[in-house]
């Protein structure tokens, strides 16, 4: 595990130049996160979400995106943060990404969208190491620094594919 | 010789070396010949050296004896494989170098593969017919394989061309015992080769199939006696370069680079296509008279051919196309009428052009000069004369009042055998084509002959009755993904349309104009939906053809005489369903052949013909599609099934069950009445698969049987998979869709109907039938649902033969919904089969009744199932 983390760290260090670019930033509680802009398809206001039974809690359900049914993940719950009531700032960011040869379109529910930020290579640091098992940092691409803010740059494919595999496991166990 | 060709020769060489016998001079000769052939390829330095070494060893071999000879052969063998390696490396290098400019356009290759696969499907049917002595089919088959050979050769698929050639050889022999088997095997090989080609893979090795085709040949027919003297001759027949060698004697060799060959390939493809169209157009002109559009079309086709042929410097084609075009131009200007003899002239030039194309094709394939077609000048003169307005000699048959086309055709001067016409008339009923078209399609007559006959017929028939508004059916090939996305978008449109029409703001509008617009919008949307659905429909023909082949193979295996009669192949179904229905059909036909039909002696004993018949038909019935498999075998035996079910513990009291219930037992997993498991069936898996697959498509299987007379299985399927009839139910705050197909009834139970079982499970007593009661709110953990069953609604559902009551709050409405997937991230949610967008724009989930039914833990006759599901059952049903 440590080895793996170290390997990822080195890889990210050398790849931090590749991570530079535009990020869409959003807020969960008081923390700031960034999504690669190319993976963001659109931002939509909160709408009726149909709950899907017997799935993990962070899967809020499915919505009708102009005739297409897409799942919505509550990122707060995914990250084991407290659930809050939706505010008028709450939005769904529709992301589109590709893992293992399959295209995914999903909505992620976040507290508030902030801005689109250009992050230069020298503003990016490798993901933190919280020690083995303490916290899973697999899906953090790196940490961006802009002015005094710290932004966690997410590999959304990893965040959500982890979501999916756990969901499948959970269903299989039930 | 191209590298792939060389590799094919090499394959053969390897086989020949293996088969070579030092004591048999002819086999050695064969090896030498192949080696010589290989030398014509510009080989890599190493490989050339190896070939020289092989030749030397071969010479030494003729002097050596016994073990020495054998070891020399072994050496040659290893050298040959060395050459193979060299060449493969060379080919890989060639590929890498030519990656930017592929030899053949991949799109062309795909088109070829598409065509080849369809053609091979047809070929299988023809092989089966030919085996029964159908001469027509044999003729068609020969032509088909020949075309395929030509096309593969042009596209550089030398192994396919070689196999086709070998198949042609087989076709010329008298059908023997395994004649059809070998042809069918070859079809399989060709099909997989076509798929490989389309996907850009190199061709598979043809060595095995060629051996199979050539080696196991039955003793040759007397005519081929000469070949008997040389045992290896059959292998040589299969060699691709044999025609080339022959042709070289007559025609000087011509070197053409790959690019030119590719150009020719395209030219041939387009021209042959175009000439085919000309025939069709002319037939139409004959029937309905010329219209400017038809003339323009003809003009354009010849113009294109002229242009391309000119660029490729195919002199004869150019001048023929030019003369025809000039004459047609006169027609276009209105100075010449396109009818009677003029039409004949166009037919003549089409025919000649087609024969020129064949020669061009042969020239390309063999790398030789194009053979010249005779009689061109005569035709050119006639065309020129027609262009200048000279009356054209008419060879019109006498008007034949009131006669049918078939009769005219069978009379002089056309003299088509009446057997052929009868056959075509029969085929016509199936294909729905006109007699003339049918005859041409079968290759029995030439388009021109039909045209003359039609003319004779129309000479007396009032022209207006002859014109039935028959237009050419034109098709285009469209990427399936595009059709799917169109259908999906139409689906969205339908939903949005419903949403708009039902929006309270719109409903409250009283303006008649708006209402009018809305209803128009609604109508157009429905029509569009209809068209969209139909775009995905394909005929079941393909699947049926496969079944015919399988029935034949199985019949042989089971040693039964079987004929499979298919009808309604043109019935259209959703494309995805056609694919899914294949599996169940395989099992049903296996079942019918193995269990349904008796052995020949038993059949004769009860006065049935020895040949068993299985009828496979497809048709529409009341908004559903029905596929029927009917055999004239022994029928199902109620007693045997009941006894078996009793011994397996599936039922407790057979007397209580109706016939239908007993027959349905054959669908139970692992159920088989077969005394022994044969290669074909008897494991009790088949019918279980049938039922499952059909239910997956939301269809049903019905059985009707009569002892001693046969059994009929009827698969009833919905028209499309994209839409289902659903019942929208409410449970707490949530709404779900239950597929109507699995709903039997819904009841509002009173307290007396509710029973609980050891305080663990709830049951509901519906008119004496005790069914488990499942609460949807507990299954899906929904808050705020009605807890008192007497105030809710119990929907009795059935799936996979299991019944249960599902407690919901209320039924909202019944409606058709378009099925959507839950999205890529959420594919496998238990108890949910998909989603649908409801009229308010929200998503509703469609319940998977098969999975929910599985929870009931009771099989069709009320016995508890395995423990695992029972636990789930009590978990969900616990009060």
Image (tube, rainbow, N blue to C red):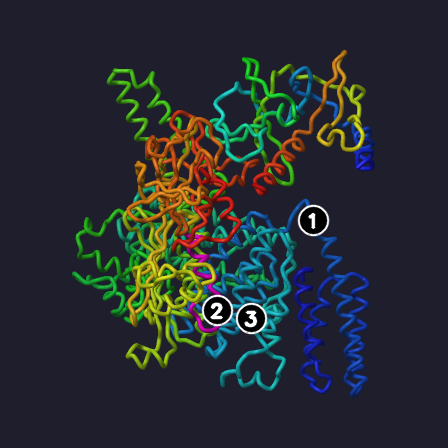
Q: What residue would you read off at disc 3?
A: B166
Evaluate whether label 3 is on the same chain as label 1: yes
Relative image position of residue B316 (x, y in whole percent): 50, 57
Report if residue B75 is visible in the image.
Answer: yes
Which chain does tag 3 point to?
B
Badge nearest the viewer, 3 or 1: 3
On the rendered structure, is B306 left or right of B336?
right
Q: Rate crowding at label 1 as few (under 14), some (14 to 19) or many (20 or more) other CA atoms within 10 Å.
A: few
Which secondary structure lies at badge 3? helix
Quarter assignment of residue B295: top left
Number of the label disc, if any, that sits on residue B680: 2
How far is disc 1 from disc 2 in space, using C-alphas? Answer: 48 Å
Q: Say if mark 2 contacts mark 3, CB within 8 Å.
A: no
Q: What residue would you read off at disc 1?
A: B98
Which secondary structure lies at badge 2? loop
Which secondary structure lies at badge 1? helix
Q: Tell me, yes or no, whether the highlighted magenta stretch contains residue B679.
A: yes
Whether A75 is drawn above or below B634: the answer is above
Out of B76 and B869, give the one closest to the viewer: B869
Relative image position of residue A169 (x, y in whole percent): 61, 40
Extreme residue in the top direction: A147
Of the two numbered discs 1 and 2 on the same chain, state the one appearing first in sequence: 1
Relative image position of residue B603 (x, y in whole percent): 33, 78
Evaluate whether label 2 is on the same chain as label 3: yes
Q: Rate crowding at label 2 as few (under 14), some (14 to 19) or many (20 or more) other CA atoms within 10 Å.
A: some
Whether B45 is drawn above or below B499: the answer is below
Whether B755 is drawn above or below B627: the answer is above
Q: Which residues are magenta?
A: B673-694
How far is disc 3 from disc 1 in space, using C-alphas? Answer: 31 Å
Residue in the picture at 66% in, 71% down: B12
């Amino acid at each position: 595990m440590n080895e793996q983390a170290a390997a990822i760290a080195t890889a990210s260090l050398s790849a931090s130049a590749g991570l530079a670019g535009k990020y869409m930033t959003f807020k969960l509680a008081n923390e700031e996160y960034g999504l690669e802009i190319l993976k963001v398809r659109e931002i939509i206001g909160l709408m009726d979400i149909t709950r899907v039974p017997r799935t993990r809690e962070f899967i809020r359900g499915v919505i009708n995106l102009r005739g297409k049914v897409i799942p919505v993940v509550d990122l707060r719950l995914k990250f084991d943060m407290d659930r809050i009531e939706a505010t008028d700032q709450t939005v769904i960011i529709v992301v589109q990404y590709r893992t293992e040869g399959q295209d995914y379109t999903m909505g992620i529910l976040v507290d508030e969208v902030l801005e689109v930020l250009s992050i230069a290579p020298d503003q990016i640091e490798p993901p933190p190491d919280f020690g083995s098992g303490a916290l899973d940092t697999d899906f953090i691409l790196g940490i961006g620094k802009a002015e005094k803010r710290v932004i966690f740059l997410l590999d959304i494919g990893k965040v959500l594919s982890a979501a999916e595999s756990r969901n499948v496991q959970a269903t299989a166990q039930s | 010789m191209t590298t792939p060709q060389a590799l094919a020769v090499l394959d053969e060489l390897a086989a020949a070396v293996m088969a070579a016998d030092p004591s048999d001079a002819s086999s050695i000769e064969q090896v030498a010949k192949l080696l010589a052939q290989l030398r014509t390829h510009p080989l890599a330095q190493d490989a050339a050296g190896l070939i020289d070494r092989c030749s030397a060893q071969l010479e030494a071999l003729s002097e050596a004896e016994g073990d020495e000879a054998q070891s020399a052969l072994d050496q040659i063998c290893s050298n040959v494989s060395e050459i193979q390696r060299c060449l493969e490396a060379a080919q890989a290098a060639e590929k890498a170098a030519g990656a930017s400019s592929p030899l053949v356009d991949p799109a062309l290759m795909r088109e070829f593969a598409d065509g080849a696969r369809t053609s091979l499907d047809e070929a299988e049917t023809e092989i089966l017919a030919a085996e029964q002595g159908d001469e027509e089919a044999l003729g068609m088959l020969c032509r088909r394989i020949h075309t395929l050979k030509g096309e593969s050769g042009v596209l550089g698929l030398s192994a396919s061309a070689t196999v086709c050639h070998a198949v042609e050889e087989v076709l010329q022999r008298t059908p023997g015992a395994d004649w059809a088997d070998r042809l069918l095997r070859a079809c399989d090989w060709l099909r997989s080769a076509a798929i490989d080609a389309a996907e850009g893979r190199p061709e598979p090795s043809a060595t095995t199939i060629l051996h199979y085709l050539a080696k196991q040949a039955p003793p040759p027919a007397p005519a081929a006696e000469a070949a008997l003297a040389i045992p290896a001759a059959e292998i040589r027949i299969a060699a691709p370069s044999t025609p080339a060698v022959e042709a070289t004697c007559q025609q000087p060799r011509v070197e053409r680079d790959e690019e030119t060959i590719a150009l020719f390939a395209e030219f041939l493809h387009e021209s042959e296509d175009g000439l085919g169209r000309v025939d069709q157009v002319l037939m139409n002109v004959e029937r309905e008279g010329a219209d400017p559009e038809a003339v323009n079309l003809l003009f354009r086709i010849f113009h294109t051919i002229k242009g391309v042929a000119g660029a490729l410097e195919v002199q004869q084609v150019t001048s023929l196309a030019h003369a025809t075009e000039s004459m047609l131009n006169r027609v276009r200007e209105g100075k010449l009428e396109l009818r009677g003899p003029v039409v004949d002239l166009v037919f003549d030039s089409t025919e000649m052009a087609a024969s020129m194309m064949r020669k061009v094709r042969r020239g390309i394939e063999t790398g030789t000069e194009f053979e010249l077609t005779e009689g061109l000048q005569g035709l050119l003169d006639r065309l020129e004369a027609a262009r200048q307005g000279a009356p054209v000699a008419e060879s019109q048959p006498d008007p034949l009042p009131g006669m049918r086309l078939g009769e005219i055709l069978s009379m002089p001067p056309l003299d088509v055998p009446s057997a052929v016409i009868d056959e075509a008339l029969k085929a016509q009923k199936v294909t729905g084509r006109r007699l003339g078209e049918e005859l041409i399609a079968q290759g029995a007559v030439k388009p021109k002959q039909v045209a003359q006959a039609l003319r004779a017929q129309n000479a007396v028939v009032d022209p207006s009755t002859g014109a039935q508004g028959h237009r050419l059916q034109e098709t285009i090939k469209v990427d399936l993904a595009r059709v799917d996305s169109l259908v999906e978008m139409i689906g969205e449109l339908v939903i949005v349309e419903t949403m708009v029409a039902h929006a309270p703001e719109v409903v409250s509008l009283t303006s008649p104009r708006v209402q009018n617009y809305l209803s128009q919008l609604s109508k157009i949307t429905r029509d569009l939906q209809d068209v969209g659905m139909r775009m995905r429909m394909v005929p079941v023909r393909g699947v049926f053809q496969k079944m015919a082949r399988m029935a034949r193979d199985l019949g042989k295996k089971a040693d039964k005489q079987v004929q499979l009669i298919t009808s309604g192949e043109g019935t259209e179904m959703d494309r995805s369903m056609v694919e899914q229905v294949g599996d169940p059909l395989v099992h049903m036909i296996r079942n019918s052949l193995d269990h349904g039909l008796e052995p020949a002696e038993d059949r004769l004993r009860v006065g049935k013909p020895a040949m068993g018949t299985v009828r496979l038909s497809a048709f529409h019935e009341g908004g559903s599609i029905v596929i029927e498999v009917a055999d004239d075998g022994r029928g199902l035996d109620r007693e045997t099934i009941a006894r078996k079910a009793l011994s397996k513990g599936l039922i407790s009291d057979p007397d209580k069950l109706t016939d239908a219930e007993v027959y349905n037992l054959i669908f139970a997993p692992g159920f088989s009445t077969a005394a022994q498991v044969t290669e074909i069936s008897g494991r009790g898996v088949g019918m279980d698969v049938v039922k499952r697959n059909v239910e997956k498509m939301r269809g049903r299987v019905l059985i009707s049987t009569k002892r001693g007379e046969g059994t009929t299985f009827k698969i009833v399927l919905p028209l499309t998979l994209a839409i289902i009839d659903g019942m929208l139910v409410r449970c707490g705050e949530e709404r779900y869709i239950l597929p109507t197909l699995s709903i039997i009834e819904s009841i509002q139970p009173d307290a007396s109907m509710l029973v609980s079982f050891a305080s663990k499970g709830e049951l509901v007593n519906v008119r004496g039938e005790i069914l488990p009661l499942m609460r949807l709110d507990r299954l899906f953990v929904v808050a705020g649902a009605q807890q008192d069953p007497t105030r809710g609604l119990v929907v009795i559902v059935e799936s996979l033969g299991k019944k249960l009551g599902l407690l919901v709050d209320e039924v909202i409405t019944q409606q058709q919904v378009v099925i959507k997937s839950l999205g890529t991230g959420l594919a496998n949610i238990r108890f949910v089969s998909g989603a649908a967008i409801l009229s308010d724009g929200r998503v509703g989930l469609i319940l998977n009744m098969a999975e929910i039914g599985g929870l009931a833990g009771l099989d069709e006759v009320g016995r508890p199932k395995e423990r695992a599901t029972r636990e789930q059952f009590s978990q969900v049903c616990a009060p």
